[in-house]
Amino acid sequence: MARSRLHELSERGVAVWFDTLSRDLVASGTLARMMEEDAVTGVTSNPTIFQKALAEGTAYDDQLRELGGDPKDAFFALALDDISNACDVLRPVWDDGKGLHGWVSMEVDPTLAYDTEATLEQALWIAATVDKPNLYVKIPATEEGLPAIEESIAQGVSVNVTLIFGLERYAAVVEAYIRGVERFVASGGDARSVASVASFFVSRVDTETDNRLWDDALKGKLAVANAKLAYRHFLDTFSGPRWQELEDAGASKQWCLWASTSTKNPAYRDVVYVEELIAPDTVNTMPLETIRAFQDHGEVRGDTALEGLDEARALLDELRAAGIDYDDVVETLEAEGVQKFVDSFHALIDGLRAKQGELAAR
């Protein structure tokens, strides 16, 4: 087949993930086609995505009718079936990529984001229920989520850490992963069997910051600069004696995953959060519109995530001088991110309850 722009991106070390999952995506063969044509090597989901999938069409009706009962229990039964089937489709990629590609992500109940023990309990349950080596359990990077992330890794559960916005929190996520791997190896675990990605959200950073700025010259810059500084921390941390000991034992680096990479402001280039964040050992998870846009006119210009680091640091000072409180920006985004997923989850459960009623009345 012809070499596409996304294949070229993949060759630079960027894993292309599709930011959606549904039963039709897998059953129709669309996911398999995208793996071939669009270089897709992973898929991810969250409550918003599942809400949309379950609300459209009738693909889930028969199983939902059989399940009955509590709509939350029904949701997890439906979702984990989809996750399991997607894991099977992507398993050859995982096998060929020695566990570095071919992952499928399933998020814990977002209403547990501020409850460490409940998050950990559900993460372990999801991992045991799906029982696939290429499953990532998504845990939010709240303060309460950090101990659950470390403990999950220490118990051999691979984790996609989600909802990361700030550099300080990202550094804490990396530390939680490394400590978790150290504990797992110390307990006799095989370091090759556990992995993680750190999902650093991008476009929302520009949206929130731009809304606070009066200086147009500073708008549309923080998201990329923030991610570049995170990648610099990745390079610095996953090197040196401490990490080398784990890597020698078979551990894999916790790749940076660029999430929320669709452009929210139509004044910005629609593939800017892909083009400007190219570097080895990264993931870019894209919705369909961004995949199509990049295939049409995306440019691969080299390792752009390594460029302009001095300017990125200087930008933080410029924004501070312009009255932007960086810490408040990222704290606001985390709180809003959790709440959006909670709202979607509640809407999802309400929708399932209504659908159960409709099916029972037929």
Image (cartoon, rainbow, N blue to C red):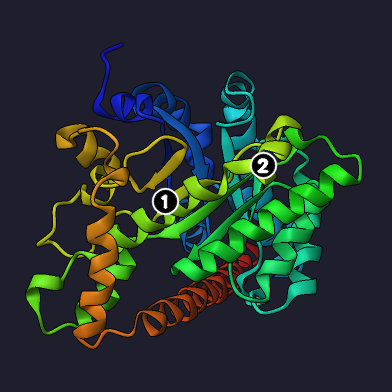
- The residue that mark 2 highlights is 241
SS class of the residue under badge 1? Answer: helix
Residue 282 appears anywhere in the view? yes
**Up-down relation of residue 288 to residue 360 (above or below):** above
**Up-down relation of residue 211 to residue 153 (above or below):** below
- The residue that mark 1 highlights is 232
Residue 282 located left or right of residue 218? right
Q: Please give the name of the residue rendered at 23% of the width and 68% of the height, measured from the top-left corner.
A: 315
Q: Label 1 sits on what residue type?
A: Arg
Percent of width and height locating residue 247? 68, 34
**Up-down relation of residue 227 to residue 32 (above or below):** below
Q: CA distance from mark 2 to mark 1?
A: 18 Å
Q: Please give the name of the residue rendered at 74% of the width and 65% of the height, measured from the top-left corner.
A: 148
Percent of width and height locating residue 14? 40, 35
Percent of width and height locating residue 226? 34, 62
For mark 2, does the 10 Å Cα neighbourhood hold few (<14), some (14 to 19), or many (20 or more) residues?
few
SS class of the residue under badge 2? Answer: helix
Residue 301 located left or right of residue 10? left
